[in-house]
Image (tube, rainbow, N blue to C red):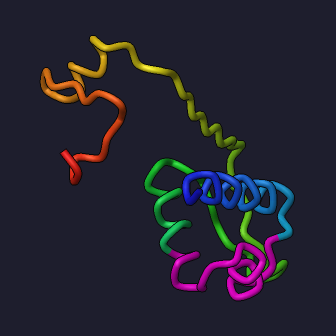
Amino acid sequence: MKLFEYIERINLLHKLISERRTGCPEILAKRLGISTSRLYVVLDELKLMGAPISYSRETQSYFYYLKFDIEIKASFKLLDNQELQNINAGITFNNYEPLLFL
């Protein structure tokens, strides 16, 4: 599932940045299994969320210039009929049939 892959990728990125052992952008992108351009997008997204990320040409590694941590949470629960009606604007679908086949 893509969500879990993304979470794993962010956790690995955070670990490597925290340990100052990311390597250059090309190497880091390869370790994460993404393109270099996608890596820059992810780094920019993290920076927009407040991550104090910088790059050292001397050590060829990204690092946090302030103490920083990332916490990602996902929770799952079964919904009762009332919650389903609230989500679906009052309509419930029995037997979880796809809309296409109703």
Residue at x 47%, y 49% (from the top left corner)? 49
- Count all numbered tags in the image, as a single digit: 0
Q: Nearer the viewer, residue 45 or 72?
A: 72
Residue at x 74%, y 78% (from the top left corner)? 28
Residue at x 22%, y 25% (from the top left corner)? 92
Q: Nearer the viewer, residue 13 or 44?
A: 13
Where is residue 7 shown, x and y percent of the image? 63, 52
Left or right: 89, with 72 as reference point? left
Where is residue 53 shown, x and y percent of the image? 62, 60
Chain part drawn in magenta = 22-40
Q: Nearer the viewer, residue 97 or 72?
A: 97
Instruction: Give above or below for 39 relative to 74.
Output: below
Quarter the N terminus occupies: bottom right
Q: Main secondary structure of the magenta part?
A: helix
Left or right: 17, with 47 as reference point? right
Residue at x 74%, y 75% (from the top left corner)? 56
Where is residue 44 shown, x and y percent of the image? 48, 66
Left or right: 66, with 51 as reference point? right
Determine the image quadrant of residue 12.
bottom right
Quarter the C terminus occupies: top left
Where is residue 30 shown, x and y percent of the image? 73, 83
Q: Nearer the viewer, residue 28 or 62?
A: 28
Instruction: Give above or below for 94 relative to 82.
Output: below
Instruction: Give above or below for 74 relative to 10.
Output: above
Would you say residue 27 sits in the magenta stretch? yes
Would you say residue 79 sits in the magenta stretch? no
